[in-house]
């Protein structure tokens, strides 16, 4: 009885059941896999669709133009004007201040954590950076109002605590963890053989960092900074609370400003669905979407270009 | 010349070493200078929130626009919002990660999917809010409420879970899969019995991070039915499940947003109290994720 003829017993039934389930499961997995591409397309389509009725009516480059004036009177029923120049400038100004803070701090922290820190202290610093990353944006906004604002009034001579500088500081702190982790990744991606070769030629740790690692990881570091900018431009709640929400072109660091994101966040609640006001906010959303996507795609290309090189 | 020690470092080498030390200590100083203010801020929030904190604060109803009472309603709102978001995004995101890592052929379309994932991660949260309003509320005609808010959050957190699932799957060695295929297992059988169990911890970490992200977000939910105040049943099961799927709701992040603007007569400790509760909730969830990851690294057998 050592040899039995293969029978269609329970095992066979089970395996045919498994075959039967294979197809629908694969279809489901494929559908989920495509979800992100569908969603990105859908986001573009829907934001465009609800901005569309207003797009032909907007004066883009005239005296009250979208890109050329600061006259934002979108709520008006008669003679509404849609100038977002001050918001665009505000958005880039606050992102610039943020990057002035975040890039040196972020890169220095990344270099220390990946090249100088011992294995134990590395873990601790990483935990610290993770805590920084975990703080939600609304809490940053709260910190900006209640803590950084009073300090700025006291020491920076600001008349209002919520202003460009405050927004920049908060956004800088928020972008640092992103820059640190991306920069650290790209430093770590440099093959160890590069470090060993430099060491064999007599380079010490610092010479390895700035003669070998920086050039080798250049595009990764650049991409990290660009993604930091993207993050700073798209940030909403912290900016809404921290920048003072005033539609003007800033002339000094302590001027209150507003941004594209903050305008949508503060006005969407009052805008009637389908009204020109709501459509104008969707138009701003479309502009934001284009800006952030352009930054992210460029950063992606920078990383990809580097991979192809090495 | 016999007395000269050839191993004495030259002036050039000493200088080099000095610069390396300088670089080391200055980058350390910058890193510490970054973390100290954060530690100070967190301590300050905890200290200022301390007078408000009590069991009654956590379980009491919001009253006088948050100037008195507790935060029970917002807490429950955040809990159910997060749960719902997780129920939507976890299966889709995990399966999407499985598709990209296990099924997708190496072609232009797959690269387009990858670009879409990173683009989705870069979409500003307020644009997600616009998308939610346009797609779910205006086009599908769904009411603003818990479900539509959770759906908006799900779209936003999808790339987080896809990325972490992909990373978890790529940590499973290729020969595990090959061994399983050689035994005659199909693709899905291999994934179900070998790949997923062996990457469970990594996937779990991603899921936990999504919880933290969803619980803290404000912008996508503020136009999707999150409100300042709702009456909540004083007792009974209604108190534990105060909101229906299509009901408006309160959420902790939105609560903090509303009360941190200037409201006359708002006691400081009420603001700091809800900031601290939100913050510690999220840091706690993140802590769990870190623990899972740490245990995983220790237990790794390959």
Image (cartoon, rainbow, N blue to C red):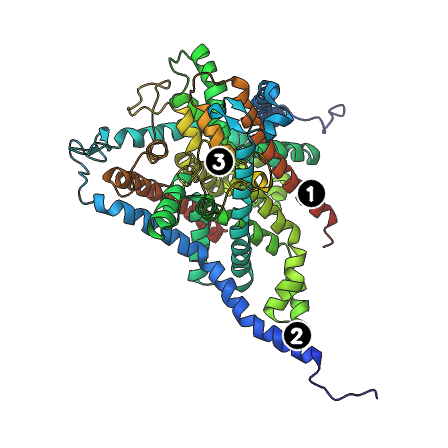
- C-alpha span from label 1 to label 2: 34 Å
Residue A294 seen in render: yes
Residue A292 against residue B188 in the figure, above or below: above
Q: Chain of mark 2?
A: B
Q: Are marks 3 and 2 on the same chain?
A: yes
What residue is disc 2 on?
Answer: B184
What residue is disc 3 on?
Answer: B250
Residue B55 against residue B237 in the figure, above or below: above
Residue B117 against residue A262 in the figure, above or below: below
Which mark, residue B294? 1
Residue A207 seen in render: no
- Residue, far right: A1
- Disc 2 secondary structure class: loop
Q: Chain of mark 1?
A: B
- C-alpha span from label 3 to label 1: 35 Å
Task: For label 1, count other residues whose C-alpha is less than 10 Å away and answer few (under 14), some (14-19) or many (20+).
Answer: few
């Amino acid at each position: 009885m050592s040899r039995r003829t293969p029978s269609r017993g329970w095992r066979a039934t089970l395996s045919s059941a498994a075959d039967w389930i294979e197809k629908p499961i694969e279809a489901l997995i494929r559908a989920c896999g495509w979800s992100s591409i569908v969603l990105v397309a859908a986001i573009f389509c829907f934001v465009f669709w609800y901005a569309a009725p207003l797009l032909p009516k907007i004066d883009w480059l005239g005296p009250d133009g979208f890109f050329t004036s600061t006259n934002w009177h979108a709520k008006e029923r008669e003679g509404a004007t849609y100038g977002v120049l001050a918001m665009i400038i505000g958005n880039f100004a606050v992102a610039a201040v943020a990057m002035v803070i975040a890039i040196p701090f972020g890169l220095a922290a990344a270099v220390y954590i990946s090249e100088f820190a011992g294995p134990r202290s590395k873990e601790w610093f990483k935990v610290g950076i993770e805590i920084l990353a975990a703080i939600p944006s609304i809490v940053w906004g709260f910190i900006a109002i209640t803590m950084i604002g009073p300090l700025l009034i006291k020491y920076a001579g600001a008349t209002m605590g919520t202003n460009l500088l405050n927004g920049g500081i908060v956004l800088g702190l928020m972008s640092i963890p992103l820059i640190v982790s991306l920069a650290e990744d790209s430093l770590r991606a440099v093959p160890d053989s590069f470090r060993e070769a430099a060491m064999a030629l007599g380079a010490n740790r610092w010479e390895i960092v700035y003669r070998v690692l920086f050039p080798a990881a250049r595009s990764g570091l650049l991409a990290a900074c660009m993604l930091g900018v993207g993050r700073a431009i798209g940030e909403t709640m912290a900016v809404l609370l921290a920048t003072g929400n005033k539609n003007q072109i800033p002339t000094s660091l302590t001027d209150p400003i507003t941004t594209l994101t903050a305008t949508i966040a503060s006005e969407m609640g009052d805008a009637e669905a389908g009204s020109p006001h709501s459509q104008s906010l969707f138009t701003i959303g479309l502009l934001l979407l284009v800006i952030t996507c352009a930054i992210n795609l460029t950063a992606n290309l920078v990383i990809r270009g580097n991979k192809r090189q090495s | 010349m016999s007395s000269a020690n050839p191993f004495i470092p030259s002036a050039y080498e000493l200088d080099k070493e000095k610069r390396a030390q300088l670089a080391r200590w200055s980058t350390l100083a910058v890193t510490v200078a970054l973390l100290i203010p954060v530690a100070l801020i967190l301590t300050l929030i905890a200290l200022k929130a301390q007078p408000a904190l009590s069991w009654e604060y956590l379980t009491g109803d919001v009253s006088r626009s948050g100037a008195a009472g507790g935060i029970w309603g917002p807490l429950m709102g955040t809990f159910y919002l997060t749960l719902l978001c997780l129920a939507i995004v976890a299966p889709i995101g995990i399966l999407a990660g499985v598709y990209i890592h296990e099924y997708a052929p190496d072609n232009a379309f797959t690269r387009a999917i990858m670009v879409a994932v990173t683009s989705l991660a870069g979409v500003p949260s307020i644009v997600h809010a616009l998308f939610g309003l346009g797609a779910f509320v205006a086009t599908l005609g769904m009411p603003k409420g818990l479900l539509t808010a959770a759906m908006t959050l799900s779209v936003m957190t999808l790339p987080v879970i896809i990325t972490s699932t992909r990373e978890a799957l790529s940590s499973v060695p290729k020969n595990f899969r090959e061994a399983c295929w050689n035994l005659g297992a199909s693709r899905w059988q291999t994934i179900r019995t070998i790949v997923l169990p062996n990457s469970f911890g990594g996937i779990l970490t991603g899921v936990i991070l999504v919880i933290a992200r969803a619980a803290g977000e404000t912008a996508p939910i503020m136009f999707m039915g999150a409100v300042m105040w709702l009456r909540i049943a004083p007792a009974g099961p209604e108190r534990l499940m105060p909101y229906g799927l299509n009901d408006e709701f309160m959420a902790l992040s939105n609560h903090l947003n509303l009360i941190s603007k200037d409201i006359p007569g708002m006691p400081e400790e009420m603001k700091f109290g809800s900031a601290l509760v939100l913050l510690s909730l999220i840091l706690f969830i993140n802590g769990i994720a870190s623990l899972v990851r740490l245990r995983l690294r220790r237990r790794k057998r390959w």
